[in-house]
Image (spheres, rainbow, N blue to C red):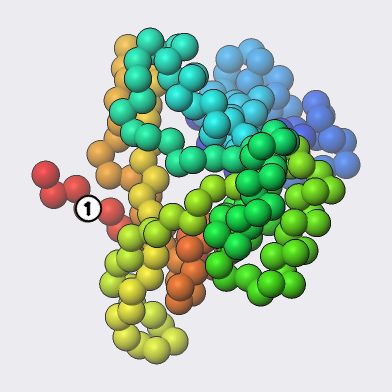
Amino acid sequence: MIYRRIDDAFLDPETFRPDSMLGVPGLFKAYKKGNVTIVNAPGTGVADDKAVYIYMPEIIKYFLGEEPILNNVPTYRCEKDDDFKYVLENAGNLVVKPVDESGGYGITIGNRLTAEQIEEVKVKISADRRKYIAQPIMSLSTHPTFIEDSGEMEPRHMDLRTFCLLGKNMEYVLPGGLTRVALQKGNLIVNSSQGGGSKDTWVVD
């Protein structure tokens, strides 16, 4: 069983990009024969398109016949005229995210930007509206964190990523999960690729 951290195109140079030095030659053949399971299988990246956020309540209703238990964060798709207009008028109070990137790359947080930078964000969105969504700035929880540079405990923003397992005879949410923490003071982006770290997660009850 393999959990991969690279894009589809770099998974297997024999099947996809022959110029790739990443991936494993022959892996896709083994996958198609059922000799290996790729947890996040090729093609599942479509769910990583952040524009999908908007449709999650409808997806839940359609496939499960249920109402969502947790409310969706309001999401504005810049491709839509009304949403685009709202984002341009409120860019200083929104988080703008490219739909096709991960790892915290390309994200701008409006209240951390200068007036000039906000105008640059507007120009960038206007040039490729399909590429961007926007959401309200959410206040993440903070947690005491030991900072090596200062040698002291300081508050840092963090989030908890949970994991679900699905199979023929099982369907459950794992207890605990991955607690990610932003190690830079005041940073709301917790991704490790942006300098974030992780904390041990303890389940006490």
Q: In which quarter of the image is the C terminus?
A: top left
Q: Nearer the viewer, residue 59 or 147?
A: 59
Residue displayed at 33% across by 79% down: 154
Query: In the image, is residue 37 above or below residue 134?
Result: above
Query: Would residue 18 be visible to someone looking at this image?
Result: yes
Residue displayed at 48% across by 63% down: 188
- Going by the numbered disc 1, the residue's amino acid type is Trp
Instruction: Count numbered badges in the picture.
Output: 1
In the picture, measured across the screen, residue 62 lies left or right of residue 153, that is: right
Could you tell me residue 62's position as x and y percent?
47, 12
Q: Which residue lies furthest to the left in this view?
A: 205
In the picture, measured across the screen, residue 16 lies left or right of residue 157, that is: right
Q: Mark 1 points at which residue?
A: 202
Q: Which of 154 and 205 is in front in this view?
A: 154
Residue displayed at 64% across by 49% down: 87
Instruction: Sort mark 1 into few (<14), some (14-19) or many (20+) by Cα contacts within 10 Å.
Output: few
Could you tell me residue 101's position as x and y percent?
67, 46
Query: In the image, is residue 134 above or below residue 182?
Result: above
Q: Nearer the viewer, residue 26 or 78?
A: 78
